[in-house]
Amino acid sequence: MRPPEQPTGQVDSPGAGLRQATKSPDERARRAVEAAWRIEWPRLVAGLTRVAGDIGTAEELAQDALVAALEQWPRDGVPPNPGGWLMLTAKHRAIDRIRRDANFARKLELLGHQLRIDEHGERLADSAESIALSSGTLGSGVPGSDLSGSDSTGPGSGRADRRDPGAGGSGRGNSRTGGPGPAGSAAMGSGRPGDGAEVTDDLLRMIFTACHPVLTPPARAALTLRMVGGLGTGEIARAYVVPEATVAQRIVRAKRTIATKRVKYEVPQGAELAARLDSVLEVIYLIFNEGYTATAGERWVRAELCEDALRLARILAGLLPGEAEVHGLAALLELQASRLRARSNDTDELVLLADQDRAHWNRLYIRRGFAALGRAHALNRTRGQAPGRYALQAAIAAVHAMAPTAAETDWRRVTGLYSVLAERFPSPIVELNRAVAVAMLHGPAAGLELADKAAQSGALDGYHLMHAVRGDLLSRLDRVPEARTALLRAAELTANSTERALLRDRAERLGTPPAN
Amino acid sequence: MRHMVLIRLDPSQAPDGGPDEQLIADMNTLIEEMTKAGVLLDTAGLRPTEEGTRVRQTGGKQTVIDGPFTESKEIIGGYCLLQTRSNAEAVEWASRFLRVHGPEWDIEVEVRQLDDQG
């Protein structure tokens, strides 16, 4: 890519005038607010859940903070530390709420939280501003003013006015000029609402809560995408091709379940961590798979959902850098995602691994996948652990990634890895995949034998890929009628219309063979 | 969606001695944050144009020119490759990148979405 030549004398940034012409300042400000809010959302809501004691309240407070931001940022500019700004505003709204609340018992309970809020606020903001704010709210903000004035003269706006002068000017944090600034200066440079360890813990708490086993898998996925991925219910609904009301209801119910089952907002420790981490990894994996092989709808691949899952995996890897399987999952998803573009053609038809144009594989994702896999292996080696299921699957994906052409795939290595996987994490689906690899190495008869064995349990009867694999192997063995039956059964079972068309097409072509 | 953030600056206007320690520290913090948010795919600074080479083809004929390229005031000094859910998010991250730079920096980023089709 060649940088456009600048005519000498033109010093102004070439894009600025253009952008002003195409988007109004209001529109740009609104987009900036939304983007900053979205970026800050996971940490904001995770921190607020800790101080408010409940996800639902935290979400409402975060929304309140957004409203305040929408009022003020377009006017004053996005503050240097948007996360800290939103957090302090939300906490102030929390205090407002407490004071508005008429229910005495509830008030008492929340006052406990308020104490914690203040405690947290001091640590967060290096006390100066938060004290000024608290005294401002508690002193001047007389109860009567709450009802009428909280939006325009409430703590959120007052604080922002005091804090924002630095934002509009150089736009740089106070951290460089030394000395703690007024507003969360420790976090200024990074734009974080708190110190690193605290944010890490809050986010981890949120992830483990959202993926708690008391919730159904769809609820875990929806809640994780919402609370950690920062997606709106509309976005989740579009991603899963379900009505928005369904997602909203799922999230509401999940939050209620968390409350009624008294799920603790904490990061599990010791042996429980491993068990609960499995649930977290599975949620992310399922989200990715839903995008990678859409179980419903017209489109074969929903890349955005894959990207959401990838981002979640990367976030988790950042939060739990010492957990090998987290890197294993990240590696698997990066490697799988590297093929996304090659996985469907112009008309959104599935392109099988063997037929994919490997020039369209994303080399950067492959490199990132290898790096993550390397970290997983290194951690496992250090601890004398065997690789987990995701690291093993990533290793298989890595073998494919290394092959310059499908024909050059190291099937011996792939079958070896599947053997290990089948031994350590036995499942009919793993057996089925092993059958495919064995068929590549030793021929369709050997593969079919394994596939039939995997099918025997009956667990795969409703799994369309089992029938598709058998259909493929049977056709390669020229057992045409059986192959056709299996392919048509697979077509019947898949919920994806693109895949159904592909399978039916294959079955039909079997029907009119040049019978030699 | 992915975005390439191209970082442009005029080297003659950049502070002597390049980024100071504080900027480097702030930048590292930001990079760590982008990494932990799962949005940063790749980033690097570019060596000065003195060490660069341009290979141009006009009318089927190639010319090779070694840097520095004095005629261009603004050069690309580095890049970030981001993965976000919206254009606006990429722009906000780019804006945070600029924000860690002090007033002594005259700097611009160009945010361009990658064409993932075809």
Image (cartoon, rainbow, N blue to C red):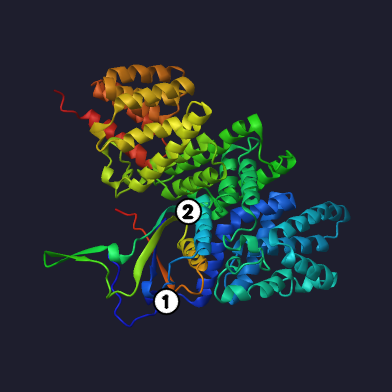
* Corner quadrant of residue A119: bottom right
Q: Position of residue A373 (x, y in %)?
A: 43, 37
Q: Chain of mark 2?
A: B
Is the N terminus of chain A in the top left, top right, bottom left or bottom right quadrant? bottom left
Mark 2 residue crowding within 10 angstroms, few (<14) / some (14–19) / many (20+):
many
| Residue A137 can be seen, yes or no | yes
Residue at the bottom extreme of this rendering:
A9
> SS for tag 1?
helix
Q: Position of residue A324 (x, y in %)?
A: 51, 35
> SS for tag 2?
loop
Quickly name the residue at label 2.
Answer: B39
* Corner quadrant of residue A188: bottom right
Residue at the front extreme of this rendering:
B17
| Residue A388 can be seen, yes or no | no
Drawn side of residue A83 relative to residue A17, left or right: right
Q: Position of residue A505 (x, y in %)?
A: 28, 36
Query: Residue at left 61%, top 69%?
Result: A70
Is the C terminus of chain A in the top left, top right, bottom left or bottom right quadrant? top left
Query: Residue at left 62%, top 44%?
Result: A204
Query: Residue at left 46%, top 48%?
Result: A305
User: Relative to A290, is A128 above or below?
Assistant: below
Give amino acid for label 1.
Ala
Q: Nearer the viewer, residue A144 or A236?
A: A144
Give amino acid for label 2.
Val
Quickly name the residue at label 1.
Answer: A16
